[in-house]
Image: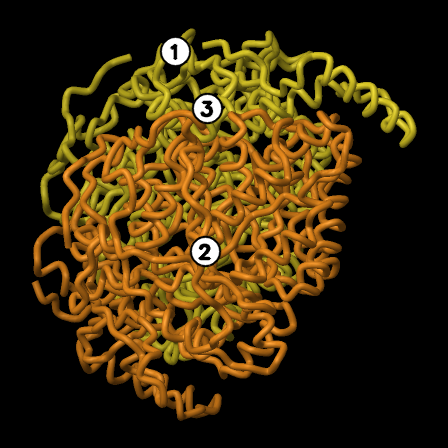
Chain colours: A yellow, B orange
Amino acid sequence: MTVSDARTPATGDAATPAESAESTAIGWHKDHVEHPARPDIRVPVRRVHLTNGRDVTLYDTSGPYTDPTTDTDVRRGLTPLRDTWIIARGDTQEYAGRPPRPEDDGLKHTAPRGGLRNLDAVFPGRPRQPRRARGAAVTQLAYARRGEITAEMEFVALRERVEPAFVRDEIAAGRAVLPANVNHPESEPMIIGKNFLVKVNANIGNSAVTSSIEEEVEKMTWATRWGADTVMDLSTGRNIHTTREWILRNSPVPIGTVPLYQALEKVDGRAEELTWDVYKDTVLEQCEQGVDYMTVHAGVLLRYVPLTARRKTGIVSRGGSIMAAWCLAHHRESFLYTHFDELCEILAAYDVTFSLGDGLRPGSIADANDEAQFAELRTLGELNRIAKSHGVQTMIEGPGHVPMHKIKENVDLQQEICEEAPFYTLGPLATDIAPAYDHITSGIGAAMIAWWGTAMLCYVTPKEHLGLPDRDDVKTGVITYKIAAHAADLAKGHPGAQDWDDALSDARFEFRWEDQFNLALDPDTARAYHDATLPAEPAKTAHFCSMCGPKFCSMKISRSITERFGADESAELSAEEIERGMLEKSREFADAGNRVYLPLTD
Amino acid sequence: MTVSDARTPATGDAATPAESAESTAIGWHKDHVEHPARPDIRVPVRRVHLTNGRDVTLYDTSGPYTDPTTDTDVRRGLTPLRDTWIIARGDTQEYAGRPPRPEDDGLKHTAPRGGLRNLDAVFPGRPRQPRRARGAAVTQLAYARRGEITAEMEFVALRERVEPAFVRDEIAAGRAVLPANVNHPESEPMIIGKNFLVKVNANIGNSAVTSSIEEEVEKMTWATRWGADTVMDLSTGRNIHTTREWILRNSPVPIGTVPLYQALEKVDGRAEELTWDVYKDTVLEQCEQGVDYMTVHAGVLLRYVPLTARRKTGIVSRGGSIMAAWCLAHHRESFLYTHFDELCEILAAYDVTFSLGDGLRPGSIADANDEAQFAELRTLGELNRIAKSHGVQTMIEGPGHVPMHKIKENVDLQQEICEEAPFYTLGPLATDIAPAYDHITSGIGAAMIAWWGTAMLCYVTPKEHLGLPDRDDVKTGVITYKIAAHAADLAKGHPGAQDWDDALSDARFEFRWEDQFNLALDPDTARAYHDATLPAEPAKTAHFCSMCGPKFCSMKISRSITERFGADESAELSAEEIERGMLEKSREFADAGNRVYLPLTD
């Protein structure tokens, strides 16, 4: 791959995307599960090779960057693997598209094009024209309703290890979404729904205050390397359009945005000057680029704004506060609400998925589950029905800050009001008292709400409430949320979810240290922590570790018990057999010199 | 204070205990709440001084180390503040005590005293003789049952902001314990029970492989500095007795141990050579030193051992595996079980609290809630009744590794079987797949199980399963568990718990950055994260931050809404009033130039 020359100090020891991914891909290799009938459908997986000769296959979101057989180049972009599927359907066509304008990158209308801080001014990759529907909706929802199983659905079925018809039916029912803009053919299809694996979104994005395009592209590949299923580009400030272009052309996962942020930049940050036309133009711009899902705060109605006045933390959603300000300024209903049908028609033409934003989500424990929040949720339910009537895939965003005893009500209400549309929540944070640890305060809430039915979790990093996440924060946020998502998969009894835990626990019980590291969500850190106290190579095969030392190792003692009684799962022993076995084993034990500790290997 | 000269590389930038505590005590000061009638009862608190002139008072576990008016010296030990109370009761007496032996420190019977790696060989502080009951049990349980409210109960009532009679009644009912060995008069009384604040224990302790006495003492003061309510010294290897003496004489919180570890050292690590006499001698040794609670794995019965043979991870408790090995070797019932009455009599004479260990707790998701685990729990219920009949305070230990959907059954069963005795759980870890992040996998389970009734949470550090925790790991573990405990306090609706969240959220909404930092569980890290992107001093008072920049600040916009509509909680507006207000405010808004952003201060 091409190594970009500019280095940004803020990223710390920033390697380029592919370098980072490759250098940490130790102990597993990228592989693909082939579709039995369609060679064009190859689902990426991670194969962990255990020292006992077995393989463990894990879901993989890292894209071609971790595939040594693929040549990647962030200046060229990823191969558009879905192009042939999209073209083959014959229901879309290329067109000239909206001409680029200086204000797309947050520049003054009169300013010359330029001002980019790094990389090239524009994305240098393959020339492309945008694509849109010739007529009716080209959404996975529309296909599913017609009974069609698309290549994307086949891909997802292999990826989730379920039947293609199940994928189709869940999408058709509106219980799942498969975000896949026809203009983002580089993405590897994935599905978001409560009957599938819980997904994790990582937010990235520069702000007017700090960070650069290159940094954001690297955060995207870095986040997916650790397991982010989607990435939201929440950039504000300059270079929004160009940053997004770089991210989309290089992203193997669906990309989400909040178009309102860019629209606000186009009116120089004056919320009251926002218009439907400026907003619509921005949505079209992003549809043509390939954004897969868009957060739309259409549920913030004029009459709900006063409900927030006596809150402890008012409105904490950026989009929500912008729309509230607009409503106040004009004393009119939100243009997102009044033009919602038209918006649906646009999204249906590109298969952009709605993420109906919770602009009035609580920003503190005190404000959780209040009237403002639930009033907006009821409006989101109404909008969900309208979106579906247009064939637009839809998910619903949720909070926020919620104490544990009020979490379940959130998902129960959302599922009822929004007809089981996928819930997509930010945490929630179970307490407000731990800035710098809000990945943990929110990881607690996230695991619980996902168990109860949330389909996708938006990560929170340690920098939440304090600053922009850097590379380490992104990784910590993703790992924390993969823990929450997997804990929920286990609690939901998702088929096969426990295999991963079992493989790691087997390795632990059998002192296969290398396998423990390689099966860990973060092999690098697990290995480093082990080596901090027992660095020598023999310790990697030692039948004890530094916590207890050789004499106190319960695993060692316990293994001797297992060996004595046998662990043959096919045999069911009666009480008498066990008693007889005990006596016998006790004699053997004494004969062997009453030793419970095996000889040390070092 | 005296600075000890030996530095241990493993502790990193180790400051001495008091130095560490003082250097981070910025933004709050140590204060005391005085008992209205008893000047000898002064409850330590942390006063956070806000920039708006208000104070927030927080529970404090850090002991005299954070009190600049107190002179501390780890070589002298803390002032025995409970001595006068214990003596005044007149039911204990000093006695010569058990003579020290080389094997107390894990040395060969014939070896000369010595071999300590740092500090002095023995604790140099004030000479003391152990104290024990003259006759009947001298436990807080015995006093409570007689209707007495002890000074310790008065202290706890002030600390928890409840009535002294409530404290007494909860102890009398066995729903709470107040661990307070008469030989640990340095401890500040605290209570463990589901109707009080959820508590956090931090495990420390050297092992045969690594770490030193000095390091362990420092971990204790460091852990309590960040909020550990009790500390367990799980040392093995050499110097067990001396390490414990240093810790006890310097600890402001109750200290727990697992006497079996030391007993095993005395028989050179040969489990089958353990005897009741060796064990009893060890328990007496530790009672005389002042250990406040002891983990006793008396529920591991011979007939339960085969139940673990087909488990994925067998027996993962050190104590459990040692007792299982003993039972197998002798084919006899555990001496802990057969001598349990005698053990109760010993503990009653010193007011040592039982922590009945879950030696058969699950060590993997696969083994959760299995027959071995619940069989032992039923035996712990039986032992709980026996202990209570001797007047011994008792809590029950719990798992371990449990998926979220199986957590509630653990606490429900324990509460039923053990007649609401305090539950004390290790996490539980909600998944096995994230070594190096098990503070998080377990923090999720810990928050949930505490919400459902667990009274104390044993922390898990990032090094769990990998190595011994260092100073940073201890802090991370404690902070994570304080989050879990506080999240549970909120979910249980504990009176006053939300005040802390509210104070922090108010500071956040009002852009009082310094107050946000000072109210944070970890002010140092919160401040450092903020400064990483906006280091300049004006940023501490800026009405925005680096996440969104000035234009996108929802808090700023939202505050303008609050200001327009007023946040007077005494007023309840009707729908018409709100509508009228909206129109009026809309006009004001237009008159003011349609600006939603306040002028920037920098």
The Cα–Cα distance between marks 3 and 1, rounded to whole angstroms, is 12 Å
Residue B231 position in % (x across, y down): 42, 51
Whether residue B120 sits left or right of residue A287 in the image: it is left
Q: Residue at x 89, y 32 (%)?
A: A575
Name the mark on residue A457. Answer: none
Q: Residue at x 29, y 42 (%)?
A: B122
Residue B12 position in % (x across, y down): 22, 35
Residue B333 position in % (x across, y down): 76, 37
Q: Name the residue beneath numbered marker 3.
A: A545
Q: Badge 3, how many Cα within 10 Å: few under 14, some, many 20+? A: many
Q: Name the residue beneath numbered marker 1.
A: A537
In the rendered view, would you say A13 is above or below B393?
A: above
Whether residue A178 sits left or right of residue A3 in the image: it is right
- Identify the element where label 1 is drawn: helix
Whether residue A328 sits left or right of residue B422 in the image: it is left
Sooner in the amino-acid sequence: mark 3 or mark 1 = 1
Residue in the foreground of this view, choosing between A469 and A52 = A52
Residue A291 visible at all = no
Tag 2–tag 3 contact (CB < 8 Å): no
Residue A374 position in % (x across, y down): 54, 69
Give, as a three-letter code, the residue at label 1. Answer: Glu
Q: Residue at x 53, y 39 (%)?
A: A199
Tag 3–tag 1 contact (CB < 8 Å): no
Q: Name the residue beneath numbered marker 2.
A: B200
